[in-house]
């Protein structure tokens, strides 16, 4: 690690952790997580059979109580916002404040600035996630007395890694837009638009395209329905939101073996036995690699554009 | 002749085939306060960015203390301070913290850093507000902090880009004095880019005039003036009512004056020397350019 990178990393870390957006974000997430746990434990105490006996602890993350969403939905929904909030003004705010010239006229490589910011962002996200997970863990232990077993702990660790990568994708997307757009408002708006598209509209578009290729009607065979469903799924997997949801379903629900309609067809012939972690990882390996690749592509694009740009304050 | 600190050779920069800097040659010697003069948009900032390796020249090269700015930017930036036009600092950090970040980026050990920061803030007169957030600083204070940031790394060359824009006359005076102090007391060679003539005239030992990306004149103010005069009309006589005007280039010798005085009907001789002021030089170049 070059010295310039280290200096930028620690400066950005201190900035992130002391920033108002971090504190507000942390409080919001904390309050939501605590109330989720509280309501969940209320409903579970009333109806203990809602949890599967083998993976009680993991179930707490996937079960939704009443009108409240489950914890994993919460992460897949809020994750992009966290990443975008930390990334969208990374470079353009340095430009508009004129600090970019001050920093880059010091003897550091140009990439130290962008690498330092990205790594500090990732570290901040990891800190937020790990503290939330630990808080939930503590509350569960205290209120319900549910102790996670080793399998569950390793699954939680993988869940943590996947979440960091997922939010890291949104962070690097935010940084990319902060390089491409000179105005912080533009980069924030565009990033949010991309998020809404990838989280919500991709489903509609995937359905429309799938119906165009394999039109379904009342006489359609099961084969055609499956084909239609597969095309839809392939298109939806462009979206990191979908990839992440599949990853966490497999990680936190050990009996998940496949996705989409195949899972329904196969499931009728299968015993619903839980898979060991290594097998669950096999199931979602392509999604995992896809998510990492998306993050790296975004970061590489930001890196290349930034290195070619002229360092001049606007 | 001092050592050459900065040398630019055939430096060119084009954006979309429009030449912003065009075959520029520049040479700065040790200890000089070099005034880099030109109107807005003449290519001053672009030239400076190329000197620091912050943008790549289309052709040509810059060497600072023998290091090539494009290939060895880190070595160049280690010994060169840059005060950008409209310098920016982290507004939520104090002056002291901002300078600390700069010393860290320069790899100055923590122990030495504090005393260097104190010294720099003392020189620019910000010691009393060292622990105030920069967001609360006035424009003039920020600019002085910029000078402090340029000083704290103890450079050999300081490149100051329009350091007096947007500052009141008193602040301008302070900054100009600071620049002279930097040059004399800290032995820093200075490149001062400006479009304000009188400031340059006041403190610069040498000037270079840039117009439309080209260096049109370089040297001391006197040298440039003399060069200009060479291009002027030769000596001649002109009669205006009772006065006979005698023009001589390069100058009227005492013998000639004596000869004129002895002429019949001459009641008095008045001698006038026209030295070109920087303003005249400037206007002349830009009218032609």
Image (cartoon, coloured by chain):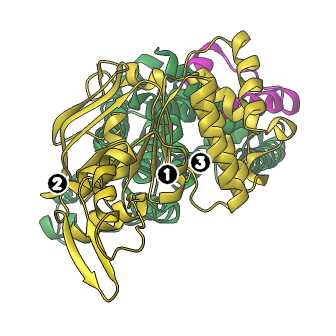
Q: Which residue is mark 3?
A: B88
The question of residue A132 being in magenta is answered with yes
The location of residue A58, given as percent across then percent down, is 63, 31
Mark 3 Cα-neighbour bin, 10 Å: few <14, some 14–19, many ≥20: many
Q: Are marks 3 and 2 on the same chain?
A: no
The location of residue A26, given as percent across then percent down, is 74, 44
Q: In this rendering, is residue A94 above or below B101?
A: below
Task: Give whichever of A83, B32 is nearer the camera.
Answer: B32
Q: In this rendering, is residue B84 above or below A248?
A: below
Q: Colour of chain B?
A: yellow
Q: Chain of mark 1?
A: B
Q: In this rendering, is residue A264 above or below B286?
A: above
Horizontal relation, residue A132 to residue A52: left or right: right
Q: Which residue is mark 1?
A: B201
Which residues make up the magenta segment?
A126-155
Q: Secondary structure at mark 3?
A: loop
Horizontal relation, residue B12 to residue B243: left or right: left
Q: Residue furthest bottom?
A: B241
The question of residue A176 being in magenta is answered with no
Viewport quadrant of the C terminus of chain A: bottom left
The location of residue B164, given as percent across then percent down, is 58, 54
Task: Give whichever of A99, B224 is nearer the camera.
Answer: B224
Q: Colour of chain A?
A: green
Q: Are marks 1 and 3 on the same chain?
A: yes
Q: CA distance from mark 3 to mark 2?
A: 64 Å
Mark 1 Cα-neighbour bin, 10 Å: few <14, some 14–19, many ≥20: some
Give the numbered dot on residue A223.
2
Q: CA distance from mark 1 to mark 3?
A: 27 Å
Identified at 41% across, 74% down, the residue is B267
Q: Chain of mark 3?
A: B
Q: Chain of mark 2?
A: A
């Amino acid at each position: 690690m070059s010295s310039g990178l280290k200096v930028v990393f620690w400066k950005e870390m201190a900035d992130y952790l002391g920033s108002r957006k971090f504190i507000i974000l942390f409080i919001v997430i904390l309050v939501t997580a605590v109330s989720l746990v509280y309501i969940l434990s209320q409903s579970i105490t009333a109806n203990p059979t809602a949890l599967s006996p083998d993976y009680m602890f993991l179930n707490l993350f996937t079960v939704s109580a009443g009108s409240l969403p489950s914890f994993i939905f919460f992460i897949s929904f809020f994750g992009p916002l966290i990443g975008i909030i930390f990334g969208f003004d990374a470079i353009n705010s340095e430009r508009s404040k004129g600090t970019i010239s001050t920093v880059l006229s010091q003897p550091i490589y140009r990439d130290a600035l962008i690498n330092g910011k990205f790594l500090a962002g990732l570290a901040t996200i990891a800190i937020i996630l790990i503290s939330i997970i630990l808080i939930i863990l503590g509350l569960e232990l205290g209120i319900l007395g549910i102790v996670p077993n080793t399998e569950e702990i390793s699954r939680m660790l993988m869940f943590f890694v996947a979440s960091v990568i997922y939010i890291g994708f949104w962070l690097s997307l935010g940084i990319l837009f902060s390089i491409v757009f000179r105005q912080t408002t533009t980069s924030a708006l565009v990033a949010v638009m991309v998020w809404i598209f990838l989280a919500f509209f991709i489903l509609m578009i995937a359905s429309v395209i799938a119906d165009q290729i394999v039109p379904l009607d009342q006489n359609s065979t099961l084969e055609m329905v499956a084909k239609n469903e597969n095309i839809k799924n392939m298109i939806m997997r462009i979206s990191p939101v979908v990839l992440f949801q599949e990853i966490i379903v497999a990680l936190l629900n050990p009996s998940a073996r496949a996705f989409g309609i195949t899972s329904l067809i196969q499931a009728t012939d299968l015993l619903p036995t839980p898979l060991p972690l290594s097998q669950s990882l096999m199931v979602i390996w392509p999604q995992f690699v896809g998510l990492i690749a998306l993050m790296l592509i975004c970061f590489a694009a930001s890196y290349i554009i930034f290195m070619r740009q002229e360092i001049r304050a606007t | 002749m001092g050592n050459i600190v900065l040398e630019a050779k055939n430096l060119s920069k084009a954006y979309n085939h429009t030449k912003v800097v065009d075959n520029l040659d520049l040479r700065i010697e040790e200890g000089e306060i070099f005034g880099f003069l030109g109107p807005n948009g003449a290519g001053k900032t672009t030239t400076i960015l190329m000197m620091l390796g912050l943008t790549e020249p289309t052709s040509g090269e810059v060497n600072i203390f023998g290091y090539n700015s494009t290939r060895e930017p880190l070595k160049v930036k280690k010994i060169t301070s840059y005060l950008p036009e409209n310098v920016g600092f982290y507004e939520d950090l104090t002056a002291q913290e901002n300078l600390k970040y700069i010393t860290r980026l320069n790899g100055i050990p923590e122990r030495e850093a504090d005393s260097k920061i104190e010294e720099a803030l003392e020189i620019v007169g910000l010691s009393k507000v060292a622990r105030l957030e920069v967001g609360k600083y006035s424009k003039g204070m920020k600019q002085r902090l910029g000078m402090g940031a340029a000083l704290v790394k103890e450079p050999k060359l300081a490149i100051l880009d329009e350091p007096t824009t947007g500052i009141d006359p008193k602040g301008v005076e302070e900054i100009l004095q600071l620049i002279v102090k930097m040059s004399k007391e800290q032995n820093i060679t200075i490149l001062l880019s400006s479009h304000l003539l009188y400031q340059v005239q006041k403190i610069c030992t040498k000037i270079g005039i840039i117009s439309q990306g080209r260096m049109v004149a370089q040297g001391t103010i006197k040298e440039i003036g003399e060069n200009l005069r060479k291009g002027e009309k030769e000596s001649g006589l002109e009669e205006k009512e009772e006065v006979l005007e005698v023009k001589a280039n390069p100058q009227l010798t005492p013998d000639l004056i004596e000869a004129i005085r002895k002429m019949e009907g001459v009641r008095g001789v008045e001698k006038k020397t026209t030295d070109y002021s920087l303003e005249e030089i400037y206007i002349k170049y830009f009218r032609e350019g």
